[in-house]
Amino acid sequence: MISDLTQRISHLKYLKFYLISTLFGLLALLPLLIRGPFYSHILVMIFLHAAAAASWNLIGGYAGQLSLGHAAFYGIGAYTSTLLFVQWGISPWLGMLAGGGVAALVAGLVSFPCFKLRGPFFTLATIAFGEVVRILAIYFRELTRGAIGITIPFRPGIENLMFHGKMAYCYFALVTMMTVFFVSFLIERSRFGYYLVALRGDEDAAQALGVNTTMCKLMAMMLSAFFTAICGTFAAQYVLFIEPISEFSIDRSILFALISIIGGIGTAAGPIIGSFILTPLQEFLRAWLGGQYQGLHIFIYGCILIAVVMLLPEGVIIWMRAIGRRIVPPIRSRG
Amino acid sequence: MVDLMTIGQIALNGLLLGGIYALISIGLTIIFGVIRVINFAHGEFLMLSMYASFWLFQILGIDPYLSILIIIPIFFIAGWLTQRAFIQPILKGPALMQIFITVGISLAMMNGALFLWKADYRSVTPSYAAITFKMGNFLIGLPRLVAFLSSIVIVLILYLFLKKTHLGRAIRAVAQDREAALLMGINMRRIYLIAFGIGTACVGVAGPLLLPIYPVFPTVGTYFVLIAFVVVVLGGMGNMTGAFIGGLIIGLIEAFSGFFITPQLQSLVYFVIFILLLLLKPSGLMGVVGAEEIGMK
């Protein structure tokens, strides 16, 4: 009886693994199937936003520390690699790692003292942090060229992480997204992941049980900042132009959080699902409404956010799970 | 060389502006103190009240100061409805969702305004907007003085209301100890609705008072709400007196930092103060110890 049960469990475990692999295999086919630069662009943005939202999810979702300052890390990633490339010709591949490192370091230094703040106070501190970075980026003109921004010269080649067409960008974004997904997936099943979920539920109780909550939050934050910065570098290489006001804007921080929430906060697949819903919506609305109805697409975001929080706080993923349960019925405990 | 006169003039300007900050912040701090929700949409309510006053002036020719009388009841009801429709249903949910609901409301309101009225800066110039008069050696703009004095009057009225009336006592009781208040037979839901209404009505007053001084545009609320957050943390979350004094202090800091430091870095000063305060004394100058942890539960 028991061996039968364990067999079924391990069978299910592999089933999930096969399922995920198949889904990613299908995603990898998508760039080949899609025609036209507009749709390819949307796909790049879906993968990129999913990767950034999944990075945010490490601290905001699993650990429940609602940061609204993540645009700072995104911007740090974009600026570090771009400045290294434009000033000294250092490859964006190295710049990407450097940007991730700088972002993780800044995240560690800034958030360590902030972690004694809880709930909304932590959020307020992250907003203030994001604003400080934005103001400094505009102010230090000699380094960042201020509000004018920096145009990255287009020198296509794998060593410069620049390509003709959008196909290569699609795959690069997909790989980034998959990397963050698997990191989340592994964390979710690790002791560290359980610590994070425990401290999200009740930090005092987790602490009383011997979890070093500050250390856990710190590690989650640094990992999160590292991957967010990588997304920033990639976006800079894709758009080939950066300027502080949009790179560091709080709207961007909200977007990452919003995508996670719509998909399912604190789950590995949630940000990907959320991005597949929200990013095409954003791009279509932007293309259709464009400049003539300024603000309308963010107005729609706001309404979606309100509706999701009120009606579906666990995200769309609970629908997916319900469908999954139909296909593979859960094991009922007998006896 | 900066002489004493200039310093005095700067301090005076700062204090006058601080009065308005105090009024905006008191609305925020009442909502936080009673409902324990940080209202990220507070600044957007201010923006809407400025627009309301602007259009009343533009279309019906109603003076901004007079429009306050129309705007107060509308904003009280708007706050009541916001609490009823959006906040109340998720009060028992996780704190994360309470933050997001007000962020969502803020986004929708700000961009709704951008959609309807475009990003243009709009201002009204009633005949008295440019009047300045001399007090001793100092120059005072009439709109700033009116804004300051009105803010003080409103704060005093609110203070008396909370201290002397039965309803005011009930509101304070909920802010101090929810369980005990519930045991005393206070209808919490009703108190929440009233508190959100009052908090919103505060910016309903502040908007028209600001209009002759400051132009209105869709993102104007963000600027003021960030200041209000600093003020509220400075004074201690939920502390009215603290918010009042905090407003004046931030007004002074703004005036002096605008004079001595480059204007581009002016807002940096608040944020640095804000972060330092959160880290060193999150309960604020006059707040209750441990208030920074209450938001979580």
Image (cartoon, rainbow, N blue to C red):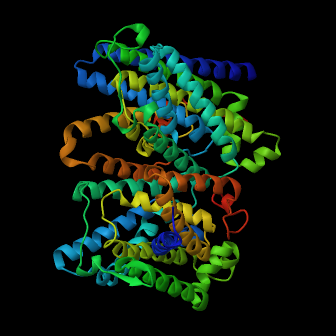
Quarter occupied by residue B148:
bottom left
Q: Closer to the camera, A39 or B252?
A: B252
Q: Where is residue B82 in the image (x, y as percent from the top left)?
A: 42, 67
Which x, y percent locates residue A210?
Answer: 82, 40
Q: In this view, does B250 lie above or below A200?
A: below
Q: Which residue is drawn at 42% across and 63% down?
A: B43
Vertical relation: B214 (above or below) A255: below
Figure quadrant of the C terminus of chain A: top right
Count of picture labels:
0
User: Residue at 31% of width from left, 13% of height from top?
Assistant: A32
Q: Quarter-wise, where is residue B186 in the image? A: bottom right
User: Which residue is at a point 45% across and 41% down the rendered structure image?
Assistant: A139
Percent of width and height locating residue A48:
42, 27
Instruction: From this view, report whether residue B294 is shown above or below residue A140.
Output: below
Picture coordinates of residue A81 (x, y %)?
Answer: 47, 22
As rendered, which of B136 and A326 lies closer to the eye? Answer: B136
Residue A283 vs A312, above or below: the answer is above
Along the line of sight, the residue nearer the viewer: B197 or A267: B197
